Image (spheres, coloured by chain):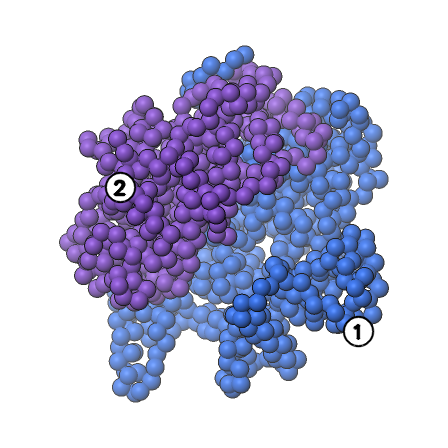
Chain colours: A purple, B blue
Amino acid sequence: MNTRRLFLRHSALAMAGFGTAPLWMQRALHAASTPSRKKILVSIFQRGAADGLNIIVPFAERGYYDARPTIAVPEPGKPEGALDLNGRFGLHPALAPLKKLYDDKQLAIVTATGSPDPTRSHFDAQDYMESGTPGRKSTRDGWLNRALRAEPQASPVRAVSIGPRLPRSLRGPNAAVALNAVADFRVQEESAGMALESMYTASRDTQLSGAGKETFEALKLLESLRKQNYSPANGARYPQGRLGPSLMQIAQLIKAGVGLEVAFADMGGWDHHTNEMAQLPNMLREFGGALAAFAQDMGDRMADIVLVTMSEFGRTVHENGNRGTDHGHANSMFVIGGPVAGGAIHGTWPGLNRDQLYEGRDLAITTDFRDVLSELATSHLGVANAAALFPGFQPASKPLGLLHA
Amino acid sequence: MKLSNRFTLFAAALSCAALLQVGGAATAWDKKLKGDEKTLHALNRLGFGPRPGDLEAVKKLGLDKWIDRQLNPSAIPETAALTERLEPLDSVRLSMSDMTAKYPPQQLIRAFANAKGRSNSPANNMTGEQRKNLEQLAERYRTQREKKDSGAAAPKPPRPDLRGVLTPQQARTLLRGTPEEKAKLFASLTPDQRQKLIAAAPPGMRGMKDAPPELRREVMAKTAPQLLVTTDLIENKLYRAIYSERQLEEVLVDFWFNHFNVYLNKGPVRHLTTSYERDAIRPHVLGKFKDMVLATAQHPAMLYYLDNWQSVDPAALQNMQRRARRAGLKIPNRARGLNENYGRELLELHTLGVDGGYSQQDVIEVARCFTGWTIATVLNDPKFQFIDRVHDKGEKTVLGQKIASGGGQEDALRVIDIVSSHPSTAKFVSRKLAQRFVADEPPQALLDRMAATFLKTNGDLREVMRTMIASREFFSDAAYRAKMKSPFEMVVSAARAIDADVDSALALSRAIDELGQPLYRKEEPTGYYNTAEEWVSTAGLLARMNFSLSLAQGKLNGVKIDEAKLAAADPQAAARALLHTEPSASTRATLEKGLEGKPPTPALMAGLVLGSPEFQRR
């Protein structure tokens, strides 16, 4: 499908023959000398198709309660009821920390959004969303990599994902770093590290030498950071699990001013085919807690940061036979940050009557997820060419107005 | 040269490579491997890479004969090195029901603790001793829960209460001593102290991780049986991969488990995975594909993981509930209707593939056919069961074929027939196999031949493998060292290359986690992808380098390296011994230059070779 991409990227490097240049040094110097208040976009993927209808609850819709006799979130005011946002929609009660961000106008929500491709396969849908090209499997790179401008002097850690593997969203021609934890990002013996660096840098295995170079450049830049004991500011407390610690690493990188521009983190486990309400609240506590802790930790720096969440598709409007939901279509997205025109719910609500549903069973999509992302990439990151960001996609003529003008 | 525009170069490289692809592809796939390269290639692809002496042994036996034996693994005797290591892992040989009795799952312990004193507690089929063990486990569970509920601040993980078991000096050693001091302490324990220590061991094995294997096992059985079951499962996999002579079988078990993936941490799946791999996957890896589909479809691990055990015909259920109400009975409210999860993944991931030509309606029809395929008793005696009264009796149409109304268990058997022999399945399975064994982008001509064999032989996987191995593409220059090792393959091949003496495979398992492929813990039904992109990342490379340095220098707990065997003074010889081929100029130059001008120790040199770019490929 797209397996030669890295090879090609690193062939490009090999052809350029810059293997001997101490690029990291230039980059590090550059990173140190430029004011590091870059605009930053953080992308968060909820893998497994989160149940958007139980996250942003359409409590004013009779059809919602009819379709979900045992797993609906009660109306605001009732025990365990939704947290009212605008009289029509409410947050799941486990997302209380996000309610505060909404009230502070730092959080905007897009409902009935997603990928227009009809697939209900987790893998294909994630692939389409991360490549940014629904229905097209031959796309080589990810949208978040394309959102970076090709810059010779860019920091080696301008694009970072947390975890051992580089996600599809960040693969592509621009260097991108995967790291488990800043504190462990090193070769355990310094002299061995130097030997390995020279092996990888000089290797004719273009794929490995390219990744090797990126590894050692990033390693040098993060060296001083590694030894610092990071403690979050403003009393922020990141929840345990996967997303909290990931966002804390990202926060540390941003504050260190190493030139971060885009970051990626993910959280799995949203595929609730059975007994959904036994699992979803805990997951949302972790999810909302992590996002809120990040915003709190970053404090004033949130002025430069936009954070966006997505999930490959939504889930069926009707609950299934096992108090769960099956694979559906539209979902919702959160947009968080200082530049965000928050405290608002965006997107056209298509309704939950049977004739309003996609294929008679799922929430219909009224906002293409690429409209959300291209608005953020152009207005916030300053991506000039939105057409190249999402090839073959014609953005809506009127922006959603997710960010302050 | 200054990099002016990476993006332009990327684009330029794209077009260059495209030209190479068209112009050069035919020759690279046509160019045959010869001699040692061919043997090495076979050991790297049909096994987890050579151990010292393997190359010579295969040459002596004859490569064709070796391949033939690998395709008929039951005739290959196992070595003492393997059988000795598997012997203590008794849980891997237990049936699901015996395993549950001997090493009760957490869910059973909880249920038993909650049902205290009631006669119908879910543990009636146990021996007296096993029941006593369960009672003790339940007691521990209750105590811990009470502690948790009372909000007492417990240190994490809790310390063992060692008063009256060890002297203060001994306790300090247990918690903070060096590995040598701990070994001395464990050896000095009296039988009485040993028993008391086991009783005092806290959850999380604090202080006990460095205990000798038998003691650790005993502690796990008494305190955390689920940990023992998982540990055995992982050690079984690693020992077999490292020491088994049936290398192809182990490669295939890894491949097919991943194809029919289940996730260890989903509730009781933890206790079902051992049997799943042993009974549903292993017997069929060189057998009929359809048998493997059936075995996985009926295995409690899969039934639970993809939720089919709860999928029932909604109408049938309503009838039952009505009847039950009239009779004054209660029906458990768990299962209430159709669940599409298994039906979809059967089509998308197990058989036809996502582009195999099925619709959402096919998913629903398949799910209807599988209603009533469930698990008899998940907790204490898990086994497949078909319950006719919750089966959807209506007519169904699957991939254009009618399945008449009024059927029972045979509806889903018919589905398995249809999907297992479908041309899309032949293509999908062939491509996936070729991607593991030949190249990330295997040539279409090879896939066509493999798919043809699949269809002609009714999905005989041994014959599909034969077609693939006998192809010119398999032993071709284009395939040679073209595959990136997965983390599991990397760790196992390194342990084999360096002839590691592994007493405990847990450190290796942790390394595999860090490289990015936690064993039995891929949550998504897709399993892990099998291409280089999945594994090449900055974090992954660093983890590979660090693992290599630790392994070769004997720093991994439970993994011994014989330095005497490594003592090759000449870096080139060291590289040759581990890579079985000439090291690249850059690797050789680095090894010769040494570290900061000083020659590295043989162990460090071996670590550098294992961490080198060359060793990451197979």
Q: Which residue is mark 1?
A: B192
Tag in front: 2 or 1: 1
Which residue lies at the image location 70% right of the left edge and 44% below the top edge?
Answer: B495
Q: Quadrant of the N terminus of chain B?
A: top right
Give x and y (percent) for residue B63.
67, 39
Picture quadrant where residue B106 is located: bottom right
Please tell me whether residue B265 is drawn above or below residue B561 in the rendered image. below
Q: Is residue A214 visible?
A: yes
Please tell me whether residue B367 is drawn above or below residue A262 in the rendered image. below
Q: Label 2, secondary structure: give it.
A: loop
Picture quadrant where residue A353 is located: bottom left
In the image, what residue type sits under mark 2? Pro
Please tell me whether residue A396 is drawn above or below residue A108 in the rendered image. above
Q: Are marks 2 and 1 in contact (CB under 8 Å)?
A: no
Relative to B337, A200 lies left or right: right
Q: Quadrant of the C terminus of chain B?
A: top right
Residue lying farthest left? A355
Picture quadrant where residue B317 is located: bottom left
Q: Is residue B101 visible?
A: no
Give x and y (percent) for residue B102.
62, 72
To the question of a shared chain for discs 2 and 1, the answer is no
Of all chains, the one bearing label 2 is A
In the image, what residue type sits under mark 1? Asp
The 10 Å Cα crowd at callout 1, few under 14, some 14 to 19, many 20 or more, is few
Q: Label 1, secondary structure: give it.
A: helix
Which residue lies at the image location 74% right of the left edge and 64% below the top edge?
Answer: B215
Task: Give me the disc on residue B457.
Answer: none
Q: Which residue is mark 2?
A: A116
Q: Nearer the viewer, residue A276 or A261?
A: A261
